[in-house]
Image: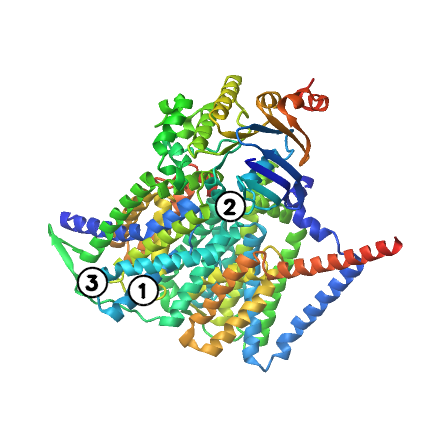
Amino acid sequence: MLLRVNNLDAYYGDVEALHEVCLQVDSGQLVTLVGSNAAGKSTALNCISGIISQKKGEIEFAGQRIDHLPAHRIVEHGLIQVPEGRRVFPFMTVMENLDLGCYPKKTRSRKEENLERVFGLLPLLKERRSQMAGSLSGGEQQMLAVGRGLMAEPQLLILDEPTLGLAPLFVEKVFALLGEIRASGTTVLLVEQNVHMALAAADYGYVLENGKIVLEGTGRELLQDERLAKAYLGI
Amino acid sequence: MDKLRNIIGKNQAQGAGGAGAPAKARDLRLKLGVLAVLLLLPILLQNEPYYQEILTFVFLWGAMSGAWNIVGGYAGKFSLGHAAFFGIGAYTSGLLYTKLGISPWLGMFGGMLLSVIFALLIGVVTLRLKGKFFALCTIAFGMLVEIMAVYLRGVTGGSEGLLIPYEPGFWNMTFASKVVWAYIFLALMLGVYGVSRWLDKSALGYRLSALREDEDAAEALGVNTLAGKLSSITISAAITALGGSLFAQYFLWLEPNFCVSLDLSQQFALISIIGGMGTAIGPLVGAAIITPLQIFLRAAFGSAASGMSMMIYGFLLVVVVLYMPKGIVVEVRDRLRARRTKAVAGVVEREVSNVA
Amino acid sequence: MDGTLFLQLLVSGLLIGGVYALISIGLTLIFGVMRIVNFAHGEFLMLSMFAAFWLFHFTGLSPYLLAPLVILLLFAYGVAIYVLVIRRTIGSPMVVQIFATVGLGLFMQNAALVLWSGDFRTIQTPASTALLRFAGIQVSQSMMIASLVAIVIALILFAFMAWTYPGKAIRATVQDRVGAQLMGVNIDRVFMMTFAIGSALVGIAGALLAPAYPIFPSVGANFGLASFVVVVLGGMGSMTGALLGGFLIGVVETFSGFFIDAALKQAVYFLVFILVLVFRPTGLLGQRGAEEIGLK
């Protein structure tokens, strides 16, 4: 087991945003966390990656507790989050953005190999490498954000709504990319509003509602679950 | 209006709830008591010139930081150039009096008028700047006035200062008795307090707090933020100029280095911030704490350590903004309220458990 | 107008401008990265000049030799002030952001007055008064040095930001704080280093100015205000802007002092300051997006 979250509570001021969330991600899997807007999906991810520090509960990554670590230390453990809204550095070139991807000291020495791997997966970035990230299209920025995440040689890659606001063509590209990433042995935790595609691609899934996990199961089980179908798949 | 209340909802709601009728009566009694003490103090201290002076300055600086508070606290625009208004008031009436023999009672209106014009100019030019940039710009305006006060030596007496002749008489606004001055400044301070209380309740006050909380949202809701800001800065400038004119006649000596200085501007701000910005009472409490401290320190350390009081001010300012950024008054009030709420909650809980 | 006189004024203005630029680089760096206007900036300069003075007083060594020590001291002071004061102001309400450093400035200036009195102190070395002559004009050697160092520092900082990992981490933090954290950047560390480096840069300025100017507790006030003018004119956060702004303000000050009135030279640059804030708030070379962070 690579990531284990146990009884995670989080608050926004006095409002409880997450309530006793438990989930786990095994090595090599693609796990997805789905749910409606404001269900607490991003909050959960931000707690795991350390962006949110006000939380209760246990988060264990690769056998070590990480719930008290600040975000930049968690990155050093190989847990990399590709944030919602991409958050590429707009006034830096594609190349500089990728450079920052391998900011952790461990990975800096292997920058060239990582770069080659990322360019292999995303040849587009190679073409655009000296372009300012802010001038890329939304889809291209998403590719850059994923590529930047891969530069850190993640053990676990967390993606928060990677297809949000993208054209259908890019949505498919993103899912194809996720498949390749997983095939290359990187574990993936995916938050998606595109429930159907996410569950179809996932080994295991969790459904979050009002800050609580209400349903879990393998991707296939969940796809066939009636309650879920009614609530999210519009069937 | 309702939308405005929503923007500022959180702050106002706290104030609106809670206080029942008995609490209000208690509040009124407390206020009347304080007022009585303030009215008696100048007479009681008649034969204590040292304490009398402290009291007089508490009133003056209380009034002046109260005036700063109208822009800084209520509108959330942090001016670091308010000494310019003070200096314009002081120099206008002082010069009209010494050079042309015009009574300061009239001259002070001249000072207020000039100050208001200057405030409108600054307002139109800088009020669209936010936060730090507004503060920087007001510093520059203050410096310009200070430089001019020094430069126009022929008129203002330059850096040597302007001496106002001591000729006691009502029309000269020069009084042999210091008690009169204590009352004049007390009246000024109470006036500023009144204006602030009015702001607490008026439409303009709501408009100001809306733009303080979120200028863009206020604007989007159709609040005329420019008008709000301009009114607050002109009211504040007029009062500050009035204080300057009165100070000129009290002190009878004007020096750019003091009455148009950045130090003075900072002092207005810091008294208000330490006391409690955005509340009517905050600046007065601030002045009651800071001003005596300053005079005691000066007495204790003499001129050799003239920096001591400002050093302590600076230190206090840093500590207050870092650890109680709402100021002493608000902080204490919040704590008391929290304790009271807890006590009430405790009683309710006990009663509930008794019933059960 | 006489050509030599014009040249003399121009060169003198550029040199004063170089001094202003040198003082302003630290301020603009701190603003650019942290979005904090250090209202105590002039007092940092005062402190570094006093540091240079006392080191000189006790060792008798050349102030230029002592500069590295002053820089180190100011770096350490920057770290301390960051930990004690600045860290708590980041992301706080505007009143905290402004008045924490206003209070710090008041404290520093008056603490210096209490500790060291208001006396003017000077460092008398041959370097203080040395003049260089060429083409019929003369220039102060110490100001020449200060100007050259300003240019060199700006170049070094530029290279540091463009090509090193810490530099990139700083730029990433400026552009997206959360994004930077997710890259493994310790933004608290970035802010601390930025503030300390900014402070050390003021240390350089203080060490180089100490032989050329009298040293007293409020010496920082005017220099501090001048550096605000320079930084706003050049564009908050822009290194090259600080250079350009410094030279411009120096020339403006010298010419207006000569042609209008020496007593009004400051008034002229405060007017420039207000005009820039009002009409071109991003300054000459300001960062894109400055409107969103402080201006509308």
- Indicate which label's residue lies in the foreground, 2 or 1: 2
**Is A173 positioned to the left or the right of B5 in the image?**
left
> Is any part of residue C145 visible from this angle?
yes
Q: Quadrant of residue B308?
A: bottom left
In the picture of the structure, the residue carrying the numbered disc 1 is C51
Q: Nearer the viewer, residue B156 or B42?
A: B42
The residue marked by circle 1 belongs to what chain? C
Residue C128, disc: 3
Q: Quadrant of residue B323?
A: bottom right
Q: Residue at x 43, y 49 (%)?
A: C189
- Give the answer, above or below, for where B340 lies relative to C24: below
Q: Residue at x 65, y 53 (%)?
A: B200
Residue found at the very far left of the displayed protein: C135
Location of residue C114 in the rendering, given as x and y in whole percent from the top left corner: 40, 71
Residue type at mark 3: give it. Ser
The residue marked by circle 3 belongs to what chain? C
Question: Judging from the image, what secondary structure is the residue with disc 1 in?
Answer: helix
Location of residue B271 in the rendering, given as x and y in whole percent from the top left corner: 54, 62
Residue B153, disc: none
Q: Nearer the viewer, residue C164 or C296?
A: C164
User: Do labels 2 and 3 touch, CB within 8 Å?
Assistant: no
- Give the answer, above or below, for where A227 lies relative to B32: above
Q: CA distance from mark 2 to mark 3?
A: 50 Å
In the picture of the structure, the residue carrying the numbered disc 2 is A70
Residue type at mark 1: give it. Ala
Q: CA distance from mark 2 to mark 1?
A: 37 Å
3 and 1 marks on the same chain? yes
